[in-house]
């Protein structure tokens, strides 16, 4: 397969392919935090994120969640459908952590009475600010029908993945999703990995995601490998 680099981000490189309707995503070992202020490398992260994303995309499709996934191309590469990414990051929160605690003074680890659905403008230069559905309409980021649809999908995905991880003694604390347009369809895109999810051990509440890198908790590479093994089990 011939490929040409189209875009390189903080964690991935996107390539065009011989097929105009398909793209190749290469997952990097580089890691960033705090809007790129902190930078580093996690050996094997690209392989972990790719394999975990491939597995979970295929799992979600069994529950009629359409995704951009086509096939795993290599240990750290995924072949996907070419989509137009909607410039909204959709976050689902089940347990208080991260920005939610800072914004509302909630103690980390508090179980939320109901999952919280949030929208963020996908723009690193603005530090991905929190928005609501009316911003989405006014800024012409998405239509009412699109927002309604991917909100419903996010709630469904949360239910499916919470149950999946629960059976593996893992708490799905929170996670972010990205959706894209494919013709007249909205499908799940990007990745589902320790970079985009907060995952804690259900018994010890040990952090098993990028927070270990963010906050210098140690055992970063080992924990990434462990979360992949438990996810695939």
Image (cartoon, rainbow, N blue to C red):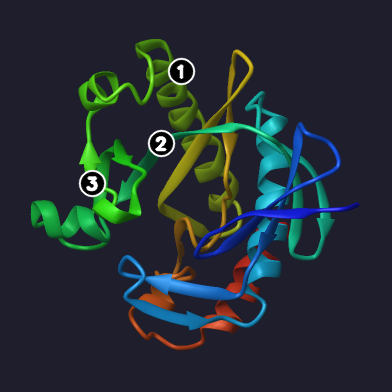
Task: Find the distance from the CA under tag 3 to the CA under tag 2.
Answer: 12 Å
Secondary-structure class at tag 2: strand
Query: Dot 1: few (<14), some (14–19), or many (≥20) neighbours within 10 Å?
Result: few
Please tell me in which quadrant of the rendered image residue 110 appears: bottom left
Task: Find the distance from the CA under tag 1 to the CA under tag 3.
Answer: 22 Å
Give how far across and how far down residue 156 sits, in percent: 50, 28
The residue that appears at 38% across and 15% down in the rendered structure is 143
The residue that appears at 84% across and 54% down in the rendered structure is 73
Mark 1 and mark 3 lie on one chain; the one further toward the N terminus is 3
Give how far across and how far down residue 170 sits, in percent: 51, 59
Query: Dot 2: few (<14), some (14–19), or many (≥20) neighbours within 10 Å?
Result: some
Mark 3 = which residue?
Answer: 129
Q: Furthest-left residue in view?
A: 105
Instruction: Identify which residue, 29 or 224, lies in the foreground.
Output: 29
Mark 2 = which residue?
Answer: 87
Secondary-structure class at tag 1: helix
Task: Find the distance from the CA under tag 2 to the CA under tag 1.
Answer: 15 Å
């Amino acid at each position: 397969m011939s490929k040409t680099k189209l875009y390189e981000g903080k964690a991935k490189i996107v390539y065009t392919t011989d097929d105009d309707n398909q793209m190749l995503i290469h997952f990097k070992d580089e890691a960033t935090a705090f809007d790129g202020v902190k930078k580093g490398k996690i050996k094997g992260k690209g392989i972990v994120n790719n394999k975990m994303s491939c597995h979970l995309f295929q799992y979600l499709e069994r529950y009629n969640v359409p995704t951009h996934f086509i096939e795993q191309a290599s240990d750290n590469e995924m072949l996907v459908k070419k989509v137009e990414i909607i410039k909204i990051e959709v976050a689902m929160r089940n347990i208080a952590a991260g920005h939610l605690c800072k914004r509302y003074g909630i103690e980390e680890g508090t179980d939320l009475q109901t999952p919280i659905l949030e929208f963020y403008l996908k723009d690193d230069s603005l530090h991905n600010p929190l928005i609501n559905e009316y911003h989405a309409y006014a800024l012409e980021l998405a239509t009412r029908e699109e927002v309604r649809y991917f909100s419903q999908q996010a709630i469904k995905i949360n239910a499916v993945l919470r149950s999946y991880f629960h059976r593996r003694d893992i708490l799905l604390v929170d996670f972010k999703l990205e959706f894209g347009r494919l013709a007249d369809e909205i499908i799940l895109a990007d990745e589902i990995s320790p970079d985009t999810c907060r995952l804690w051990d259900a018994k010890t509440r040990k952090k098993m995601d990028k927070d270990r890198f963010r906050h210098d908790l140690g055992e970063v590479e080992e924990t990434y490998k462990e979360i992949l093994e438990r996810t695939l089990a």
